[in-house]
Image (tube, helix red, strand yellow):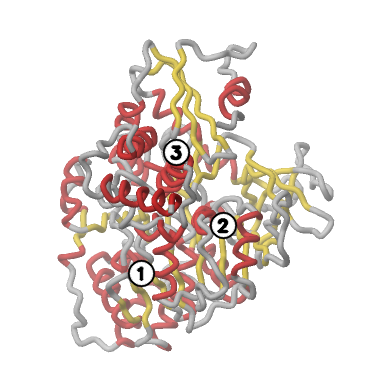
Amino acid sequence: MRNSSINFLYENVQSNPDKICAADEHNALNFSTLFTRAYNISKVLHKKNTINQPVLVYLPKSIDSIICFAGILLSGNFYVPVDIKSPLKRTEKIIQNLVPYRIMSTHTYEDNFKALSIPYEQIIFLEDINTENNNNSMNEMIAQMRRITDQIIDTDPCYIIYTSGSTGTPKGVVIPHRGVIDYIEWAVSCLEVNVDDIIGNQAPLYFDNSTLDIYLSWATGAQLHLIPENMFLFPVKLIEYLEEKEVTFIFFVPSVLISISQMNLLSPNKLASLKKIVFAGEVMPTKHLAYWQKMLPDRVYVNLYGPTEITVDCTYFFVDRIYKPDESLPIGYPCNNSAVLILNEHNELATIGEQGELCVRGSSLALGYWNDEEKTRAVFVQNPLKKNYFDRIYRTGDVVYKNEKDQIIFVGRKDSQIKHMGYRIELDEIEHAVGSLSSVNKCCVLYNNDKKEINLFYEAEKEILSAEFRKTLATLIPEYMMPRKFYYFKRLPLNPNGKIDRKVLENEYMNKTE
Amino acid sequence: MNNLNAILDILKQIRPEFNFAESKDFINEGLLDSFDIVTVVSKLEEQFGISIDGEDVTPENLKNLATLEDFIRRYLDKNES
């Protein structure tokens, strides 16, 4: 049994040393070079008797980031990737919560670290680390690293991913090695990825969907290809790029697949190398999926579902036919070694067709939220169906039901959390940011599901120019949380309880088709 | 209203905080993201009564105001001929 998710890499460094491991637009690195560079990082990071410490990775999406992840794991510590485009105030909150042991970055971001008053000695700059092999044989390097990583057990943390938090402070989801091992073992056999595959990565590395891309490559010897972010702006370029790089496997958020279908860019002779199209992160509209299926038949389409807290995905569905536009695409069945409970409001198992909250059991469960016992306790709870032994479940807050075929169907969220362009966002976090502005008295943020737009309704002495609003908010929240529409009110409508009447706002401002 | 102003109006509606007239490269200067591009294209179609081919939604055509104006003119010419 594997104790650390880095074992996947050990195995392929030995069996496929010269195979390309990670590539981007300009560079490609084979397994032995990647391992050598990770080894050198581990040498700098590792201190005796210091393992299981959080190391923040502050880098753009790059092969370097992948090397850092490997190097950090080799040093017996765990990685915490963050978005370098995020406002510094948000990064500061993460750093305050995390208290990283070290930060890995490059000199390019020195100004940011100064602004965040991070002590210089806490930062490890990649440029300062040797990239060469100092005449060590691969077996010798692996043996040295194993002496460190053999101290790790599979319930130790592997990574932390920060997600949107309702109080305005992002929550750090702590994922153990066994979550990753469990997920990847399922994925390799279920999605049938092998050494000849070229995996086209879309997900940012601070978004947990990238876990699948990275570890599938480490586990099978397949190539991980990091697609430049700009390609996603222009679907026609993206298709050319996927063809040029002969990508065989993609795990994208639906919004990317939708933009290709909206522009009608596919035809049966396109994307000849592409065999598997996997998606997750938000609901895939069947209308757009049907377009892909008609244009590119004989491909495998897989719908995955899961929150960060259970290690990326816990259910899967191989699309078995073309679904009508008004039909829901099932999220399917639990992944191997994961169990799904659908609990109704009385905490009993929901019957067929009855809606309830999707709860997850299994090795995939996160260890909780970093440095936040209260939030952890609220959602990682004892299985209410078991009284005689400890059986932890994660309550996702997602409402689902099972149909007659035992397939799980996603209905929506219980609370104010939404999925927007694949990102999980607490609308409360945006409200919190807007509410912190002195010029705003009250506000309310609603999501227009049809238009996929975040709408802000606010009360203030006078109207605030939306340009000004965006500029100020850009220092508090990331771009993907930015409201698209701003509605000014002298007084916001209230319901009988004296709360902002969200129903009225929804009906009057969001259901109108322009 | 001439084409140039109409295009500028659409861009201003979507991203009021940026000065599109002065930008030489909307994409590399970060004025538009993927979400905006979809919106820009659909608003242009609406405004000019054209149907833009997905193949034409490229960084070259959406680079700046001048390339956009050229791009729209080509579509309008095609419609007239």
Q: Residues within 10 Å of mark 2 (few under 14, many from 20)?
A: many
The amino acid type found where label 2 is placed reads: Ala
Q: Is residue A388 left or right of residue A212?
A: right
The amino acid type found where label 1 is placed reads: Ala
Numbered circle sitting on residue A70: 1
Q: How crowded is mark 3: few (under 14 residues within 10 Å), some or many (20 or more)?
A: few
Q: Which residue is drawn at 44% across and 50% down?
A: B80
Report which quarter residue A134 is drawn in.
Answer: bottom left
Along the line of sight, which residue is nearer the eye, A420 or B40? B40
Circle 2: element type = loop
x and y percent of residue A37 in the render?
Answer: 26, 75
The amino acid type found where label 3 is placed reads: Gln
Looking at the image, residue A69 lies above or below residue A441: below
Q: Which chain carries label 1?
A: A
Q: Is residue A133 left or right of residue A70?
A: left
Report which quarter residue A477 is drawn in.
Answer: top left
